Structures are given as C-alpha cells and as structure tokens.
Amino acid sequence: MKILMATSEAVPFAKTGGLADAVSALSLALAKLGHEIRIILPRYYNIDRTKLQLIEGELGVPLGGGIEEWSAVYTTELPGSSKKSPVRVYFIDHEIYFGRDGIYGTPSDPDFLDNPRRFTFFSRAVFQLCRKIGWFPDILHAHDWPTAMVPVFLKFWERPLGPGGEFAKTGSLLTIHNLGYQGIYSKDNYCYTNMGWDVFYNAGFDDWNMMNLLKAGLYSADRLNTVSPNYARETRMGSQGFRLDGVLRYRGDDYSGILNGIDTSVWNPKTDTLIPKKYSVKDMSGKALAKEALQKEFGLVLDPDVPLVGMVTRLTEQKGVGELFGPAYGAAWSICRDMDLQLVLLGTGEPWCEYEIQSLSSRLSNFKAQIGYGERLSHLIEAGSDFFLMPSRYEPCGLNQMYSLAYGTLPIVRNTGGLADTVENFNQETGTGTGFIFDDLTSNAIYNTVGWAVWAWYNRREYIEAMRLRGMAQNFSWEKSAKKYLEVYEGIINQLGSV
C-alpha cells in the first residue's frame, strides 16, 4: 500500500509531545513491513533547510477568495529508514505561516491567531504536493486537529471530481492522539477553505457558532481511531469526550483504539548508550548502577535499599499535578514526609507548579527535581528508578509507563486510557501484576497507592523482583501496532471498493 502521513509533528524534525514520536515510529514500522510510506509536515523555523533537498518549482495552493498561496517544497529521508524501504519526508515551506518560533504558539502566545489559516493551507498543500510529484496514496492518514481538514478536503473537494479524479480511490484515517485539543476558532476563518457554507454544516464544523476543525475531521474521515483501546471507550463517554462523545458514538462502527508502541531501538536497556551500563533480565546489575548514578545526579543519599520513585512529565492539569503538588493539599509533601523513599522529577509546564516543585525540593531532603527536559536524564530516571509515578487525569496512551516496564521500573498509575491497557495491577497475595493502579484522582488515592508500593518494596521484595522481570518480558514494539493499522487501512480500501 501507498500511505501518506499528514502531520504537524514528526521526530526528529518537530516535536511538542507523543504525536511526533508516534508518527515517525509507525511510519518506520509500516515501511519495514513492505509498504510505501511518506510523511508531509510544515517546515518550521527550527528545521534547517540547508540540510534538506529542494524540489524544483513552487507549489501553488488555492485558498478562499481566489487566493493562491505559493510555497517551496523540501525533502529528505526519515532517519532510521532502511535502504530497501526508505520513508521520504516532505516539508511545506511558507515563511509567513511557518517561519516563526513555535509549532502552534509560543509561551507568550500559546495559540497563534492564524492557526486555522496556517493548517488549512497545509491541508490543501497535501493534495497539491501529490499532484506535483505524481504520487497518489491509497490512504491519507491524518493526525489530530491540525490535519483534520485533510479528510474534509478529500470527501468534499477531491472525491466529487469524479472517477477521473486522482484521489477517487484514496481512503482516509484520522487518528486522535488527544481529544482535549480540537482546533476551535472563529468561523470567520472558514472562508480560507474555499468551500461552500453547505459543507460547513454538512461536515460538522459548527460548534456553538465557532469552527471546530477536529469535529469536522471526525465526521468526514472514512475511519477513526485513537491510541489505545481503553481511551476509545472513555472518549465515547461524556466525562472524557470533551463534548465530542456524541460524534464518536455516532461514528462508533468506524472508531477503534490501537495501542501505540515504543521505539525499542531507543528505549531498550539492552542497547541504551545513555545509561551507565546496559542490562537485561539475565543480568540486572546495570539497573543497580543506574540507580546509584541517579541518586548522585540529584544529590540524594546513596542507598540501594531505599525505594526510588521517578517522574518525567509535563506539569499540566492533564498529568494530575494539582493533586500531587497543589499547595496545602497535594500529596507529594506527605509522601516524602511520611514514607522511607526518594522521589525525583524532571519536567516543565505551568509556572505555579514549577515554583511549588522548586520550593518542595529545597525543603525536603528526599525529593529533588530539575525543571526542563533532557534525553539523557530521562533515560537515567527510567533505568535508575524502582517505581515510576503517573497520576494522570486522562492519558490517551502514555509512553512512559511502557518505557518503565521495559526498564524493569514498576509504574504507579491511575486507571485511565492507555495506562489501564498496559499495566496490570499488583495482587499482593499471589504476586501477579506489573504495577500499582488507583481509580480516583485524589491526593489520598495517590498517597495510599505510593504507600502500597513502598510497603510491597519492604515486605514483598521477591514479588517486586518478579514483577520487574515480567514487565521487561512484554512486547511493546511498533510492529504489533503497525499490523493493526494495516487491518484498518485494508478495511477502508475494501469499503471504498464496494461503493
């Protein structure tokens, strides 16, 4: 099959979250299975075009009001591609729309006012690029709200051109990586789409007199999926549906959950060059060395017998930071005061939370934190920690709990989204399980579950060791996920063939 990934992010070129990792890893996995995969994304300011190959001739992109915007196109191969089945990446270069700091916004301007125009332009450019290079995919795979216009344009603009149209037999899949971000803007921006107002209502753009890009994509794509089976169930309910649960129930037969994988070429203790010593289930000595190095890194007491809890997280409401670090009510202070453990954190996010974490770190000898992000330190925390805490309010898939299991670090997680799909709760009578799970997002629930894990550390140590090995034996590779995506693609093609 020929598959084109339309995305606003892809590592190593542009990243704000897990979307970037998922697109690139899935593309590589599909290519290894013998399919022709290409990626298209904007060329943001931070992407050095001197390292890319320019495709001759400008790309014309028609927008509303008779305007035709022009852009350059660059290309390269996705790092990690094999010579036999390389993944080619195309960059749409438009200085006014994308030649700026930030993908969706900046710290001072988190959501650019012209985002609907920027990503409408980019979505139209997807089709124009295919015409320019003479390559037409079997599947257009769009990701999240920035490219949700791709299935809309396919359904209401490209396919109506008739059997002679280049995209008459092209199907579309829209993947929801986080339903909390939908691309809601003033409907005055709709004029840029160059489509009639009948499409505005038929495609489902209307959202309380606003324009909802993701909602239109959900109505228009041939199939929908999200990044874990449990999140697919949760988003059909009002509590997790962000006002689109009705749309997802309506599209229920076309909506599924496929668990993300992890890049085992990067996150693998047997091959990891960012930790002091590689290790495996046959020789765990490297994990002990990583714990010692982690304690040194954060200025903690060097003690192999004290349980060490790690966190690598964005400090946002979604991640449950209020219940953990909220002044006067968060669980972190009581956990560190009452329990014989160590807690380390690496993260960045909301200013109030960064301030509170720095304050706690200065007052508690067994809690240390670094504000920011670093790849080396992230790997060291995963390898050197005994437990990994993820008290998420919601988590479409989550990657860190899978990284943790791969490194023999036991997750402490809330029963939500992909966390519930990947972590099996500890049974203290039988020793089964791979982590510790709580249901309600409250400070007491976090406190009690961390306490449960610490109790198991000191009283059921043989179970802890067995759980580590059990977690490390699991297969979270992208190959499994890629095969499930292929089933969805094939279903779309068969569906189109029967129409």
Image (cartoon, rainbow, N blue to C red):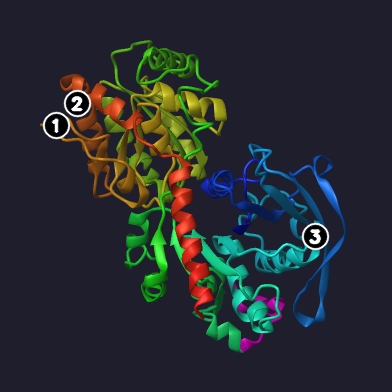
Report crowding for label 3: few under 14, some 14 to 19, many 20 or more residues within 10 A (C-alpha): few
Answer above or below: position of 249 versus 234.
Answer: below
Q: Is residue 423 visible?
A: yes
Mark 2: amino acid: Ala
Place of residue 156 in the rendered image (x, y in percent of width and height, measured from the top left): 62, 80
Q: Which mark is residue 428?
A: 1
Q: Is residue 177 visible?
A: no
How far, Cα to Cα, is label 1 from label 2? Answer: 8 Å
Place of residue 403 in the rendered image (x, y in percent of width and height, measured from the top left): 43, 34
The N terminus appears in which quarter of the rendering?
Answer: bottom right
Residue where numbered disc 2 is placed: 456
Element under label 3? helix
- Residue span colored magenta: 185-197
Answer above or below: position of 201 versus 363.
Answer: below
Report if the CB atoms under discs 1 and 2 are less than 8 Å apart: yes
Q: Is residue 160 left or right of residue 486?
A: right
Place of residue 29 in the rendered image (x, y in percent of width and height, measured from the top left): 54, 44
Residue where numbered disc 3 is placed: 96
Q: Is residue 426 left or right of residue 39?
A: left
Mark 1: amino acid: Gln
Q: Residue furthest right?
A: 57
